[in-house]
Amino acid sequence: MDAAPFWKLKTLAEMTAEEWESLCDRCGKCCVLKIEDMDDGTVHYTDIACKLLDCGTANCMDYENRRKSVPDCISLTPDNLSSLQWMPDSCAYRRLHEGLDLPAWHPLVTGHPASTRRAGHSVAGRVFPESAVEAVDIIDHITEW
Ligand code: SF4
């Protein structure tokens, strides 16, 4: 009988750096602009990409140095899981932290890196560049991912 996969055996804090990185499904949902409702704290996602996001592939164009040009980019680590409240429901880190399993379309489950996009969970090709949207129009771009 095959052993259970690492994400079912370990907590997030127990994972190796490689395991931790592999949890990201590359959906890009955390790389869109978000608006926080000042009255109730609700976080609304938009379909406007961070300036470093490649809108066609949903990959960060400068991942290693991203905090230099986007200082408020959330860099998830086992030590700042409180940031997970900003993450979408489908985010693997958030799901595991909340005691859920990975979704059936997750690349670690399917064995295919493209399965996130095939399942409709990637923002690739579905977002506008930040430079193309006027600040006053951002509210019109609130989107349910
Ligand atoms: S939302 Fe989660 S799974 Fe998706 S790109 Fe961001 S960190 Fe990775």
Image (cartoon, rainbow, N blue to C red):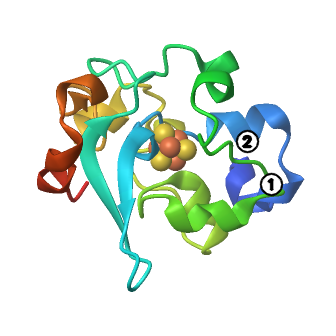
Q: Determine whether, in the image, residue 10 is placed left or right of residue 122.
A: right
Task: Give the residue drawn at x 80%, y 54%.
Answer: 78
Number of residues whose C-alpha sits closer than 10 Å to that of mark 2, classed few (under 14), some (14–19) or many (20 or more): some
Task: Determine the residue located farthest toward the top in the rendered image.
Answer: 61
Of residue 108 and residue 38, the one placed in the foreground of this image is 38
Q: What kind of residue is marked 2?
A: Trp
- The percent position of residue 26, horizontal first and vertical second, equals 46, 33
Q: Does residue 143 appear to the left or right of 12 in the view shown?
A: left
Residue designated by label 1: 78
Of 119 and 26, nearer the camera is 26
Q: Nearer the viewer, mark 2 or mark 1?
A: 1
Q: Position of residue 124 (x, y in %)?
A: 27, 28
| Callout 2–callout 1 Cβ contact below 8 Å | yes
Which image quarter: residue 45? Answer: bottom left
Position above or below: 27 against 98: above
Q: Quadrant of residue 117?
A: top left
